[in-house]
Amino acid sequence: MCRLLRGRNRSPGLHPLPAIADPTSPKRLRRSRVGAGTQPAGSPRGGAGGGPEREEVSPGPALPSRSQWPGGARGSERRPPRSPGGGAVLGAGPRPRAGRGGSMLHRVRSAVAHLVSSGGAPPPRPKSPDLPSARSAPSAAPPEAPRSPPARAGSGSGSGSAAPAKTAEARASFSRPTFLQLSPGGLRRADDHAGRAVQSPPDTGRRLPWSTGYAEVINAGKSRHNEDQACCEVVYVEGRRSVSGAPREPSRGQGLCFYYWGLFDGHAGGGAAEMASKLLHRHIQEQLKDLVEILQDPSPPPLCLPSTPGAPGSSDSSHLVGPQSCWSSQKEVTHESLVVGAIENAFQFMDEQMAKERRGHQAEGGCCALVVVYLLGKVYVANAGDSRAIIVRNGEIIPMSQEFTPETERQRLQLLGFLKPELLGGEFTHLEFPRRIQPKELGQRMLYRDQNMTGWAYKKIELEDLRFPLVCGEGKKARVMATIGVTRGLGDHNLKVCSSTLPIKPFLSCFPEVRVYDLTQYEHCPDDVLVLGTDGLWDVTSDCEVAATVDRVLSAYEPNDPSRYTALAQALVLGARGTPRDRGWRLPNNKLGSGDDISVFVIPLGGPGSYS
């Protein structure tokens, strides 16, 4: 006889009507094993459980999309079983209790009568207020045009019933730097992995400070969106207090103005890069507020800033100072070092803000940060990550940054693993070996090096050496804990070792290396530039090739043409991207072009208004 199918959904006041399979139907019903145990009605089920066999009917009513399932779209391991025709398994809800809503015999008779009258078609399932039907379910909206500018990254996670919807919208949004002034159509072209059109600020719009050139292109499919971000700003800093300790009067105050450029190469999502592009220069501004009057005073910086009278800690503490014989002399502190310290602190505060707001999905993933600050005649280049900056001056190449990778920071990482072995979780060893050690090599002597060594030596292999090395691989394949290929940057507070709960953030530093270039020491010509680029440029382009492109492109333009630097940035991006061919994007030498996001700033070293 027929097997009874108990309906999954119920209408208010109605009991589920069993569906009777037609034994004469040419399509045999496929059996599926439904997991044992009681589960609330309407929850997705699936898999090979140990429960009773249930039948499934095809076709069936439309079920919610993956995003509408309990647990969100990530619950792929709990997909509801489906029939060959797309219907869902009936009977996923709990069994009705005996004696509830009439006798079972009455329901069987009603089902048989309906089966005979309808010619073998299964009875229609009652509508349920819990699961949307095919008509009532919201249709998939067309892809929303990317938005520019995006919502404020530092606005917090928010609260209330609309928070999940806002979070989903924020994750799906795609934004590019506002100075690109992209229309909705331009944003769609910028997000096209196939065309990979180069984007630059329009010539008709307001030019970037110093006639800076900028160009970018999306990756070839490495990530869903372009995870690079950029920022170019002119920031005014109003002093917080005077050296005497009295609050500065707004009418008397003379602040400072600094120029700011930033490139942020995101990974594991673009949230951290977007947040840093909007807020890092504000943190630098905040750190410089205490230095406005000091930097304008040619005398050496004071050792301590006076406290406001009546403020905590303003009492006399001279009795705490030891004998002067303990101090040989006061260390010399320059104004330049104060600015360097302000930039370093700003990076730290930016990273701390990301840690606080990571729960609100405002700063998912992490990013490398390359920042340039021009202040009082000097250029400060701060780098945390694997981006790069070089100065091309009269054909000479001056490196202004260093890439921070597992190879370049091997000894720092090994030292931390040696001093704090609990960070390795018993899964890694701080020692480095030329290759992975095999168990059969226990007791043999093999080459190794530790945190104190730049060369190699031999040691006897012990059981602990079989663990995975903290730093492995070489070149672009070098990784920390077999996971991440950069050792400095912002964010990555949720980054864990694959298939583990071991955090990687303790080994990653947010502090940049800051190099200073004094513009007043040289007389620069219009062809002297500072080139900033994310690793998408430098993976396939050398410093010498960039210098050759600088000479070739700029020589084709008049020295006073402000568009020459944008043309140079576009040429650098196009040269690294290559052209599409049968086997991907290729360079003129037929080598693979860069498949990564590429972002480039070209900053003329003449400063504002020098070339007319």
Image (cartoon, rainbow, N blue to C red):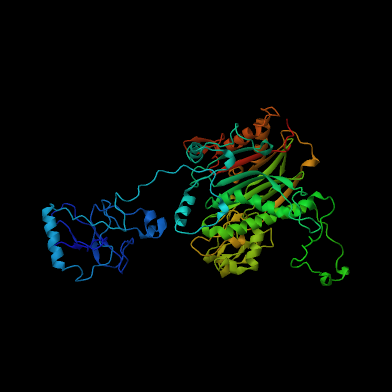
Confirm whether residue 400 shows in the render.
no
Query: In the displayed structure, does residue 598 sit left or right of residue 457?
Result: left
Query: In the displayed structure, does residue 71 sit left or right of residue 356?
Result: left
Q: Pinpoint residue 304: horizontal percent, then vertical percent.
A: 80, 61
In the image, residue 320 sits, relative to residue 378, either above or below, namely below
In the image, residue 471 sits, relative to residue 611, either above or below, namely below
Q: Pinpoint residue 478: horizontal percent, then vertical percent.
A: 58, 54
Q: Quadrant of residue 81?
A: bottom left
- Of residues 292 and 485, the one nearer the viewer is 292
- Of residues 301 and 47, the one nearer the viewer is 301
- Of residues 111 and 256, the one nearer the viewer is 256
Q: Pinpoint residue 363: horizontal percent, then vertical percent.
A: 55, 55
Residue at position x 30%, y 58% in the image: 129
In the image, residue 50 sits, relative to residue 170, either above or below, namely below
Confirm whether residue 473 shows in the render.
yes
Query: In the displayed structure, does residue 236 sit left or right of residue 102?
Result: right
Q: Pinpoint residue 115: horizontal percent, then vertical percent.
A: 13, 56
Residue at position x 33%, y 51% in the image: 137
Quadrant housing the N terminus: bottom left
In the image, residue 225 sits, relative to residue 49, either above or below, namely above
Outermost residue to the right: 325
Query: In the displayed structure, does residue 259 sit left or right of residue 217?
Result: right
Quadrant housing the C terminus: top right
Q: How many marks?
A: 0
